[in-house]
Image (cartoon, rainbow, N blue to C red):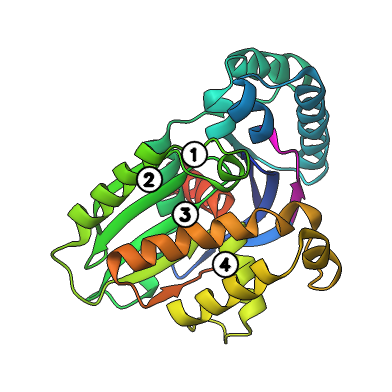
Amino acid sequence: MLRYAAIDIGSNAVRLLIADISKQDGKYKYKKNTLIRVPLRLGDDAFLDQHISAKKSGDLVKTMMAFKDLMDVYHVTEYLACATSAMREAQNGAEIVKLIKAETDLDLEIIEGQREANIIYANHIEAELDENKTYLYIDVGGGSTELSVFVKGVPEASRSFNIGTIRMLDNQDKEETWEEMKTWVKENTKNYKNLAGIGTGGNINKLFRMSDEKDNAPLSLQKLNSMYNKLTSYSLKERIHSLGLNPDRADVIIPACEIYLTLMKWTGIKQIFVPKVGMADGIIKLLIEEKLD
């Protein structure tokens, strides 16, 4: 049994996904074995101070040490560790990469927005949907939003924007970035009618579970809008205690909703499909493509 691991160091949380790789009908598939999520919130430091504090970098090193031990126990043969928006913006990002290498012997790559988008799209979700349709793929993270337009299963355009949930909570999202995103998305979708959405990321997955929609059914703009209105009618405490949201989900879910709704309204998207995949899944798929296919 081959085992691969993906480490995704995001602006809100750090994730380890360990997956079992097998071959069926001549194709390599993976099954999620273990997923661990640690809410470190590196973005709070990175977006406000452009520097990750000693406390948070210490917590990150401890987390990576724990991940290394787990990977050893699970006999992981290949791994890829990627850091996104927060580490991209922290002036001491490269120093932390060196510290992690020294303390844990793990290699960590700080990736650019375009590579982040490519890893997310390695999931090839569009292949499971109607290939005659045009889709806007939206991945919302803590520090950035990755967008891609798929026409008949082929990515026509893709771009990463510095708009994310932690960035919005910290009031570090800029008006001109929103305008830039609006211009880009309108320009790249204007020739397509009946555009549908594909949404990935922890928040849209949580929203989908809360919506009680059947698996594989899309989430409508109307439903998402009414869920947003419901969520904003509760205080942060009530979202944690009455709705049962984790504290590190209860605040970011509101700005995430705002990003999805805004993009859907700009493009006339009436429904969004929510596959259960994210950055870590994309890393596993990429490893399979690079090492086995």
Query: Residue 187 vs residue 146: left or right?
Result: left
Does 228 appear above or below 170? below
Does 102 appear above or below 236? above
Q: Position of residue 200 (x, y in %)?
A: 51, 60
Q: Position of residue 66 (x, y in %)?
A: 83, 36
Q: Give SS at disc 3.
A: strand
| Residue, disc 1 | 173
Residue 51, picture quadrant = top right
Chain part drawn in magenta:
35-42
Do tag 1 and tag 2 residues touch (Cβ < 8 Å)? yes
Instruction: Answer with mark 4 or mark 1, whichever residue precedes in sequence.
Output: 1
Does 60 appear above or below 214? above
| Amino acid under disc 1 | Asp
| Residue, disc 4 | 276
| Amino acid under disc 2 | Trp
Instruction: Answer with mark 3 or mark 4, whichever residue precedes in sequence.
Output: 3
Answer yes or no: is residue 27 visible: no
Cα separation, mark 1 vs mark 3, equals 16 Å
49, 8: nearer the viewer: 49
Instruction: Answer with mark 2 or mark 3, whichever residue precedes in sequence.
Output: 3
Q: Position of residue 90 (x, y in %)?
A: 59, 21
**Residue found at the far left of this picture:** 191
| Amino acid under disc 4 | Lys
| Residue, disc 3 | 139
Q: Nearer the viewer, mark 4 or mark 2?
A: 2
| Amino acid under disc 3 | Asp
Tell me, yes or no, whether the highlighted magenta stretch contains residue 87. no
Cα separation, mark 4 vs mark 1, equals 27 Å
Does 266 appear above or below 183? below
Residue 278, picture quadrant = bottom right
